[in-house]
Every structure is written in structure tokens, then in C-alpha cells.
Image (spheres, rainbow, N blue to C red):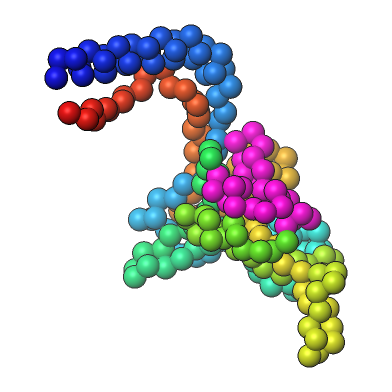
């Protein structure tokens, strides 16, 4: 028993020394990851966040601020779901080690400055990312350009003899294409339910708790 404890103590000291030597360089690569969090207890399910998100991301289709300009389905990148009497906004958590990115077979998902992005032009609509996401924050939908459905080259409906619509995955990107400021959903929420959280990610924490279970 005493021999086993001595071996464990020596191993722990070795790991501690390695951490001290490597930590200084590794911790300088810390990345600040951001994501929108919600206080579900105060959400009233008005879906103002959904409409604001849709308006920001669909401007290439000629959508304006007035009624009657919407010519495509309303497909936001944030979704308000209902569970009993409670409403919960569901959004991407921009995971540090994103399962969706690992699942994508064409590398259409990447992380830039702590934000997980989907390249719609590379996406093939295979839904692998949808299955991999633990939060249900990704949805595959039809792609529209200038108010018209885009078709998938080489993919046709044999019975109808016409090209099938192109689909691509979409999710919260923290309004990456806007000029700074808060994401549209955060600004639009009338009850201040949503807020942008910024977390410093440290790949090698200075203090780490380890538990070992020796074989006796």
C-alpha cells in the first residue's frame, strides 16, 4: 500500500512540474467564447427575438422593416420553445470543442474568435451537425436568394422532373455580420431575458483537481 501511494505521489509531482513548464505558453492562447443566455423564468414567448434575428439575417432577400416585405418563410437562428407554461429560447452555445464541427463531413463549420460559424456555401444539408448538437440549436432549412428558392445542382425529383431545393444548416452566429453591438435578439427582447455572456477559455488551467483510483 505504501509503495502504491509513493508511486502516485511521484506521478502527481511529475505532472505538476510539466504543467508549470508548459502552462505559461499555453495559457496565452486562451480564447474568449461568447454565447447568448436566457432567463427562461421571465420569457413570455413573444418571439420578438426570432423576428429580430430573421430580419438581420435575411436582408439579402430584400426584407424591409415594413409589413408586406416578407416574401420568404420566417426561419430565425434562435427558437423559442414551450414546455408547459414555460418558454425557453434555444440558441447555439458556441462550444469550445464543438461536436457539430467534428461531425461535419465537408468542414463547413469552423470557429472564429470563439464563435462557431457555418459556411452556408459549403454546407450540403446532410444534418450530421443537427444530430451532433446536444442543445438542438441547429436547423436545416431551404436556402433563398433574392426571394427565390435556390436549387441543388444535380439533385432532381424524378417523378416531377424538376430540381430539388437546396438546403443548408443554420444557427446563431451572434450576428457576426453586423457592425458590433449586441446580437439582435438581445436588443429586441422586451423583458431583458437575453444577455450576451463572455467566458474566458483556458486550455490549461493553472489549478486543476485530479482524482486517481489506484489498483490495490
Q: Where 199 falls versus 155 (above or below)? A: above
- The residue sitting at 55% across, 35% down in the picture is 33
The residue lying toward the viewer, choosing from 53 and 135, is 135
Q: Which one is in front, 59 or 6? A: 6
Residue at the (78%, 90%) spot, across then down: 159
Direction left: furthest residue:
1
Image point (17%, 28%), residue name = 216
- The answer to whether residue 196 is above or below residue 161 is above
Magenta range: 98-123
**Residue at image location 85% in from the left, 69% down from the top:** 153
The reply to whether residue 165 is visible in this rendering is: yes
36 or 130, which is in the foreground? 130
| Residue 120 on the magenta segment | yes
What is the total number of numbered labels drawn onto the structure image? 0
Residue 64 as seen in the image, left or right of residue 16 = right
| x, y percent for residue 45 | 46, 65
Amino acid at each position: 500500500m505504501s509503495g502504491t501511494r509513493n508511486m502516485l505521489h511521484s506521478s502527481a509531482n511529475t505532472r505538476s512540474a510539466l504543467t508549470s513548464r508548459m502552462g505559461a505558453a499555453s495559457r496565452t492562447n486562451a480564447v474568449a467564447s461568447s454565447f447568448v443566455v436566457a432567463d427562461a423564468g421571465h420569457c413570455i414567448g413573444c418571439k420578438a427575438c426570432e423576428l429580430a434575428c430573421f430580419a438581420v439575417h435575411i436582408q439579402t432577400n430584400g426584407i424591409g422593416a415594413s409589413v408586406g416585405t416578407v416574401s420568404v418563410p420566417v426561419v430565425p437562428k434562435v427558437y423559442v420553445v414551450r414546455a408547459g407554461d414555460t418558454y425557453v429560447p434555444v440558441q447555439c452555445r458556441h462550444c469550445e470543442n464543438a461536436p457539430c464541427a467534428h461531425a461535419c463531413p465537408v468542414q463547413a463549420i469552423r470557429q472564429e474568435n470563439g464563435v462557431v460559424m457555418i459556411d452556408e456555401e459549403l454546407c450540403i444539408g446532410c444534418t450530421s451537425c443537427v444530430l451532433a448538437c446536444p442543445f438542438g440549436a441547429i436547423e436545416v432549412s431551404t436556402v433563398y436568394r433574392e426571394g427565390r428558392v435556390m436549387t441543388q445542382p444535380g439533385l432532381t425529383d424524378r417523378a416531377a422532373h424538376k430540381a430539388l431545393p437546396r438546403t443548408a444548416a443554420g444557427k446563431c452566429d451572434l450576428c457576426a455580420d453586423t457592425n458590433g453591438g449586441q446580437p439582435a435578439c438581445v436588443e429586441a427582447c422586451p423583458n431583458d431575458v437575453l444577455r450576451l455572456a463572455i467566458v474566458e477559455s483556458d486550455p490549461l488551467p493553472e489549478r486543476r483537481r485530479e482524482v486517481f483510483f489506484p489498483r490495490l
